[in-house]
Image (cartoon, rainbow, N blue to C red):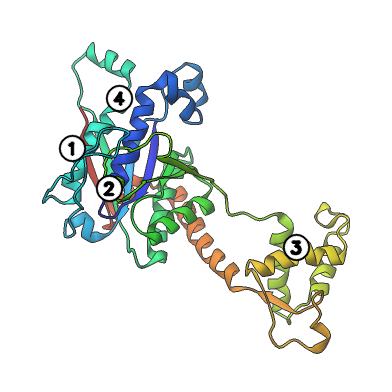
Amino acid sequence: MGVYHLMGLGLSPGAVTGPISYLAELYQNWETEGKDFFARSGEAEQRQDGKQVGSIQLLVIFTTKEVIDGQEKCEHYIKNPYGQVSGNPEKHTGNMKQVLEPLLKEEWSKFIDKEEEKESSKVKPQKKTGTIYWVEVDRRDIKTTYERIAKVVASLAEGSGGQGKELWMNLTGGNNVINFALQMAASLSGEVARLYYVQAVNDKAEKCVRYTNKDSYWVEVPMIPLVMNDLNKRILNVVEELQKIGTPCCQDIYGMLKQEYPYSCLLDNVEFADFVDKYMHPLWKAGLIATEENCNEQYQNDKNRLCRIGKEWDKIQQYDAIMKTALTEVEEQRLTIEKLAEQQTWITKQEIQLN
C-alpha cells in the first residue's frame, strides 16, 4: 500500500507535479536516496523484505469549483529539466485537468515497482491507472474548507475499518485558507504522517513543473499534534464548571484541583505561585483563558484575578468537534473515500492511465 497525498492547488500545475517529480527521482534511486527518505513508509514486513515503499497510492486535490470545472485556466508553465530553473513558458488553452494529466502520467508512472513489472511481463500486461479525487473548497471560507478536508481525512483514516492509510499533506498550492485548513486537520486528527511544502527560489521557478533544486526544494514541516497536557485540560474544564455558578479566581481553581487530586502527580509539589506562573499565564497568553475586565478590587492582583474561558478555546473546540464528528461518522458507516465521492457532489473522481 502506498502513500495518499493531500494537497491544495491554485492555478500553477507545478504545485502538484513538482513534488511528485522530486519523489519519483528518489524512488527511482532507491538504494542511494529512496530507502532512507521513505524509511517510515509502508509496513515493517515490507521494509524487512527489502521491498520499495512510499509509492503514490492516490492524490486528493483541494481547489475551487472554477479550477475543477475549467472556468479558470491554469497559468503558463515551464517544463524544466530536472533540478534546474530553465526553459521558456509553454502556452496552452486547456483546463487544469487536461494540463495535469500528461504531466502526472510522466512522473507517476515512475513509481511502478520494477519487481511488479517483471511479474506482470509473465502474464498479459494490465493497464496501470492513477486515481485523483478533486475536492471543491471555498478559498474564502475556512470552516467549509476545513469540514470537507476533515471528512476526506476521516474517510482515509477510518473508512477502511480503522486500518488507516499513510497520509502526507502538501502545503504548497492553493491559498492560505486551504493550507491553514490542511495543517489544522493534520494537527487535530493525529492521522497525518508527513507535512511538507516545496520551495521555489524565484518567480521563474514557481512556473516550473519539475523540481528545481534537490538540495533546497523539499521542506519538511514539523507535525505537531494539537494536544495539551492533562493539567491544562483539567484547568480549562474546571473554569468551565465554575463559570456556571460565578466567575472563579486563580485561588478557586487551584483549591478545587488540590481538593480533587490531593495525591495526584498532576499537582505534585506545585505551589500556588508556580501554578499561576507555569500554568495559568501560558493559558492567558494563548487566549484559552481570559481575564474579567470588571474585577473587584480584591482580585486585581496578578495572582488572584478573575478568569473565564477565552475565545481561542472556543475556536479550538469548534474545529476539534468537527474533526471528531467526521472520524466517528466515517468509522460507524465504514465510509471510504470511494463511498464519500458517491454521496457528495463536492468530490469527484478522475482516473488517468499511467503506462
- Figure check: 2 above or below 274: above
Give the CA separation, mark 3 to mark 4. Answer: 52 Å
**Horizontal and vertical percent position of residue 350:** 22, 44
Q: Is residue 42 visible?
A: no
Mark 1 vs mark 4: which is more N-terminal?
Answer: 1
Give the residue at mark 4: 112
Mark 3 vs mark 4: which is more N-terminal?
Answer: 4
Give the CA separation, mark 4 to mark 2. Answer: 31 Å
Which disc, if any, is residue 220?
Answer: none
Tag 2: amino acid? Lys
Q: Residue furthest top?
A: 122
Name the residue located 40 percent from the left edge and 60 percent from the top edge.
Answer: 176
Give the residue at mark 2: 204
Give the residue at mark 3: 279
Give the CA separation, mark 1 to mark 4. Answer: 16 Å
Image side of residue 231 versus residue 60, left or right: right
**Horizontal and vertical percent position of residue 278:** 77, 61
Image side of residue 306 versus residue 130, left or right: right
Q: Is residue 303 visible?
A: yes
Image side of residue 123 versus residue 303, left or right: left
